[in-house]
Image (tube, rainbow, N blue to C red):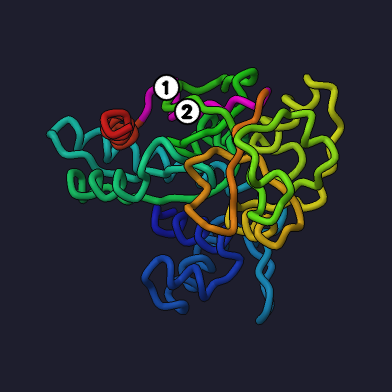
């Protein structure tokens, strides 16, 4: 069994396509298919059920995948540690970023990191804070920027507070409250809201504040990103509660400080158990730039 075969299996499992997996691994599809077939023959099991249109892990493939992923991770980590001992940082760096990050210029930080450590393969994905905490604890992610309510600090990972801020109400310029300098949370009780999906940390920040004030609100629009949320506000379909820094200067929008508004804390998070050299280097760089 070769490490390259494991990489091919992982790529096919994640891409659900031999064609996309071959493109990702920079190899022709026939070579990738041949290597996976050879591995299946060696193991005596089929790892994938495939047709011309569909690829799916078999039960044997599902059982094989976690150990294969661990083996590849351990190999990459061993190579990175050896290189770090010689003064060169190598390996992979997997970063997670929430859609409302404001405390760090992530593209600029990654750019600076890449120039300092060009041998590191950097990957970036968006998502939710709770997903990132779980992924870091499980070793599937190295570093993440989180945004959480002040009453719900992260556990199971190391963190540093990057910023603490109160959310603002975002309304359209035509909204009756648009001319106000400040509003109370209770004044928003009858509004229709656009917010993040129910149960997500981005939504929880607001839910906790409204619940503490004894207010029941209506969230009619659940979206994952701020751009769509703000467009709904522009169309006068609802109001939003967001960090002020993510709201662009736009004559169609107004931001209003809110008495009793939710407090949001932005964290940098990484593994509390033996972070990789690449992760440690990125954390150091990010904290300097925050």
- Residue drawn at 31 percent across, 47 percent down: 110
How far separated are the C-alphas under marks 2 and 1?
6 Å
| Quadrant in the picture for residue 149 | top right
Above or below, 165 against 174 in this view is above
How many badges with numbers are in the image?
2
Q: Residues within 10 Å of mark 2 (few under 14, many from 20)?
A: many
Task: From the image, tell me which residue sits under label 2.
Answer: 267
Task: From the image, tell me which residue sits under label 1.
Answer: 160
Quadrant assignment for the C terminus:
top left
- Residue drawn at 60 percent across, 35 percent down: 181
Where residue 257 appears, as percent x and y from the top left, is 60, 33
| Quadrant in the picture for residue 138 | top right
Instruction: Say which of 273 and 163 sits in front.
Output: 163
Instruction: Say which of 45 and 230 sits in front.
Output: 230
Above or below, 43 against 88 in this view is below
| Helix, strand or loop for disc 1 | strand
Where residue 60 appears, as percent x and y from the top left, is 67, 53
| Helix, strand or loop for disc 2 | strand
Instruction: Say which of 50 and 158 sits in front.
Output: 158
- Residue drawn at 47 percent across, 39 percent down: 141
Above or below, 59 against 77 in this view is below
Q: Say whether marks 2 and 1 touch (CB < 8 Å).
A: yes
Residue 11 seen from this side: yes
Q: Residues within 10 Å of mark 1 (few under 14, many from 20)?
A: few
Where residue 27 appears, as percent x and y from the top left, is 38, 73
Where residue 232 appears, as percent x and y from the top left, is 69, 58
Q: Which mark is residue 129?
A: none
Residue 45 seen from this side: no
* Residue range highlighted in magenta: 260-275
Position of 69 with respect to 131 (left or right) is: left
């Amino acid at each position: 069994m070769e490490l390259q075969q494991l990489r091919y299996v992982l790529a096919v499992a994640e891409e659900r396509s031999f064609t996309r997996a071959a493109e990702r691994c920079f190899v022709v599809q026939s070579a990738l298919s041949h290597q996976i077939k050879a591995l299946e023959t060696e193991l005596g099991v089929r790892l994938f059920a495939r047709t011309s249109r569909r690829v799916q892990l078999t039960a044997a493939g599902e059982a094989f995948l976690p150990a294969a992923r661990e083996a590849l991770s351990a190999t990459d980590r061993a190579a990175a540690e050896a290189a770090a001992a010689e003064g060169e940082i190598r390996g992979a760096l997997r970063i997670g970023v929430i859609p409302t990050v404001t405390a760090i210029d992530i593209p600029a930080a990654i750019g600076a990191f890449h120039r300092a450590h060009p041998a590191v393969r950097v990957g970036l994905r968006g998502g939710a804070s709770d997903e990132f905490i779980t992924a870091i604890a499980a070793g599937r992610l190295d570093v993440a920027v989180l945004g959480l309510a002040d009453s719900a600090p992260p556990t199971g990972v190391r963190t540093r507070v990057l910023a603490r801020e109160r959310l603002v109400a975002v309304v359209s310029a035509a909204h009756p409250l648009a001319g106000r300098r400040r509003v109370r949370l209770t004044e928003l009780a009858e509004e229709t809201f656009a917010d993040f999906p129910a149960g997500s940390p981005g939504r929880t920040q607001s839910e906790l504040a409204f619940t503490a004030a004894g207010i029941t609100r209506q969230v009619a629009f659940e979206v994952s990103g701020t751009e769509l949320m703000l467009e709904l506000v522009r169309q006068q379909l609802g109001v939003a509660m967001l960090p002020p820094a993510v709201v662009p200067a736009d004559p169609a929008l107004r931001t209003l400080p809110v008495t009793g508004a939710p407090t949001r804390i932005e964290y940098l998070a990484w593994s509390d158990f033996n972070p990789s050299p690449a992760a440690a280097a990125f954390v150091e760089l990010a904290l300097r730039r925050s």
